[in-house]
Every structure is written in structure tokens, then in C-alpha cells.
Image: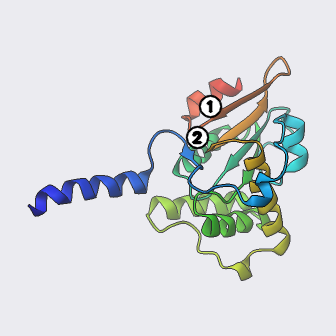
Amino acid sequence: MKRTLLLPICAALIVQIYGCGEKAKVEANPAPSSVAQQPAATLSIESVASNTHGFNAGNVLSARKIYIFFDPQCPHCGELWKAAKPLLSSAHFIWIPVGLLTPEKSALQSAYLLGSQNAVRDMDNHEALLDARKGGLEVSAAQTPENAVSQVKANTEYFLRLKLDSVPFAVYQGPGGEMLTFSGALTTEALKERLGI
């Protein structure tokens, strides 16, 4: 009897810990009423660039800019972070932190990363802690700059106004100047091919 109950419980825990699919759905946390009352935002590269705050990773002089919405607690966002690392010399990634999956913890970690003097190093440390099943960076409200907290809140509200439903979500310019997007984790090779680098 105990064994028959143990298997479904273990399976449920594994799904909960690792997530499922290639992207994390954010519909579990409904939009705050302040967002619901605002008009939907229109997705464009210019709009993302002017309405969000992110941290830079990679070659800031590269013409290839990729804006990526991510939640620090999202395992698929972490996979995309790792896949992008070998491409940092060829592209300019702007990582836009939001607080969606575990709103309080995600928001604090997002604000800490956004306010960091070395966000790439801190993001690497965060991902190593997640890989070790330690929950990522331990951050208190006292460790997060007030302006970064406000910026993460604005990023999150903007993401919700775009009516997007999963992270990671990337926006970038294609070879013909058109806006392209993708969501979910990719391997380094798939990301390289997708970005044309």
C-alpha cells in the first residue's frame, strides 16, 4: 500500500522541482489589478528597449541585441542563460528580470541581479546554487536597491501588459530588420542558429 502511494508522490515532486516542457508558464500568478486596468502593450523591439530595465551580458558593441525576459526561479531561463554563455563574444544579451513564478523570492532575486555591479558573476553564482538545489541567491529586502525593486516591478507589469504567458521570452531583430521572438530554452547550437551567429 505504501509503495503504491510513494510513486505518484515522487513523480509529482519531480515535476514540481524540475518543471515541465521548455518554458515556464506564468499564468498561475494572475496580473495585479493595476495591470489589468491598463491597456495592453504592443510588442516591439523599441518598446521593450524603452520600457524595461535589464543587465548586459556579452559584447555591448555587437549589432546583434537580444532582449530576454526571465525569472530567476525559472529552470528554463537558467538553461537559456547557460546556452547563451558561449555566445557572449558574438552578441549583446540584455536580461530583463521579472518576478512571476514565486513573486516575492523572484522579485528580490531579480532586484538584486538588476542592481548588481557584476550581474553576470552573480547570475552564474545564482544558477550554481539552483543546480545544487539550494534555491538560488539568498537575498533580503535590505540587500536590494530601492530603484531596482521599482524597475523589476515595472518590468513585470510591462511583461503582463504584453499578454505573454511564459519565460524565458526573447525579442530580437532578424537579418531583414524584422522583429523576431522565441520562448523557452534552447541549446547553444539552436540559439546560435536562431540568432544567425
**Kind of residue indicated by mark 1:** Leu
Q: Quadrant of the C terminus?
A: top right
Q: Position of residue 108 (x, y in %)?
A: 68, 70
Position of residue 76 measured from the top left corner of the image (x, y, whole percent): 54, 46
The residue lying toward the viewer, choosing from 181 and 143, is: 181
Which residue does the image show at 80% across and 74% down from the upper left? 145
Q: Which label belongs to residue 83?
A: 2
At horizontal 66% and vertical 32% (from top left) the residue drawn is 182
Which amino acid type is shown beneath numbered disc 2? Ala
Q: Dot 1 surroundings within 10 Å: few (below 14), some, or many (20 or more)?
A: some
Q: Position of residue 126 (x, y in %)?
A: 59, 63
**Looking at this rendering, what residue extends furthest in the bottom direction?**
142
- Tell me where residue 5 sits by quadrant: bottom left
Question: What is the C-alpha distance between the residues marked 2 and 1?
Answer: 7 Å
Report if residue 197 is visible in the image: no
Q: Which residue is mark 1?
A: 191
Q: Residues within 10 Å of mark 2 (few under 14, many from 20)?
A: some
Left or right position of 74 against 161: left
Q: Is residue 187 left or right of residue 45?
A: left
**Taking the image as drawn, is residue 44 in sight?**
yes
Of the numbered discs 2 and 1, the one sitting upstream in the chain is 2
Closer to us: 145 or 152: 152
Secondary element at image label 2: helix
Task: Please report the residue visible at 12 percent of the width from the left and 59 percent of the height from the top.
Answer: 3
User: Looking at the rendering, in which quadrant would you find the N terminus?
Assistant: bottom left
Q: Give me the disc on residue 27.
A: none
Q: Secondary structure at mark 1?
A: helix
Numbered-mark total: 2
Cβ atoms under marks 2 and 1 closer than 8 Å: yes
